[in-house]
Amino acid sequence: MNIFEKRGKIIRLLILGIVVSYLSIIFMRVNLNLFYIVASIGLILIVTSLILLIKHWRCPKCNHLLDTRKGQNSDLLFCPHCGEKLR
Ligand SMILES: [Zn+2]
C-alpha cells in the first residue's frame, strides 16, 4: 500500500468520525448518556485519524512531512524535499 492509498483510508476514517460526531446530536434529546458515548467515539475517530495522517503522510525515503495543498496532492509525483518518486 503506497502513501496515497494510506492517506485515502485515513481521510475516510476522518469523515466517518465527523459523521458520527454529527449524528451524536440526534441522541442529545433522546438519551444524554448515549450522546456522550457516540460523541466520544466520533471525537476519538477524528483525533486518531489526524494523528495517523501526520504519522503516515511522509516521504518514504527522507521522512519529511509532505505538503497538503488543498486537495492538489493527486499531482504530487515527487517529494519536494529529496526528489524521491512517490508514485
Ligand atoms: Zn523525501
Image (cartoon, rainbow, N blue to C red):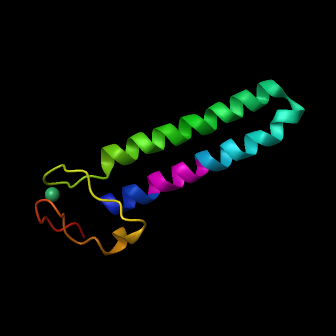
Between residues 11 and 6, which one lies in front from this camera angle?
11
Q: Name the residue at 53% across, 49% down.
A: 14
For the N terminus, which image quadrant? bottom left
| Visible residue check, residue 78 | yes
Quarter of the image where one finds residue 7: bottom left
Any magenta on residue 11?
Answer: yes
Q: Quadrant of ligand 1?
A: bottom left
Q: Position of residue 79 (x, y in %)?
A: 18, 63
Q: Position of residue 71 (x, y in %)?
A: 42, 67
Q: Residue furthest bottom?
A: 75
Lateral position of residue 16 relative to residue 52, left or right? right
Quarter of the image where one finds residue 39: top right
Lateral position of residue 63 relative to residue 67, left or right? left
Q: Position of residue 31 (x, y in %)?
A: 85, 29
Depicted 83 relative to depicted 23: above or below: below
Lateral position of residue 35 relative to residue 8, left or right? right
Depicted 64 relative to depicted 70: above or below: above
Q: Position of residue 70 (x, y in %)?
A: 42, 65
Any magenta on residue 2?
Answer: no
Q: Name the residue at 22% across, 66% down.
A: 86
State whether the magenta stretch is mostly helix, strand or loop.
helix
Between residues 3 and 32, which one lies in front from this camera angle?
32
Lateral position of residue 38 relative to residue 68, left or right? right
Q: Residue furthest right?
A: 30
Quarter of the image where one finds residue 52: top left
Depicted 71 relative to depicted 62: above or below: below
Q: Residue furthest top?
A: 33
Q: Name the residue at 74% across, 39% down.
A: 24
The span picked out in magenta is 9-16
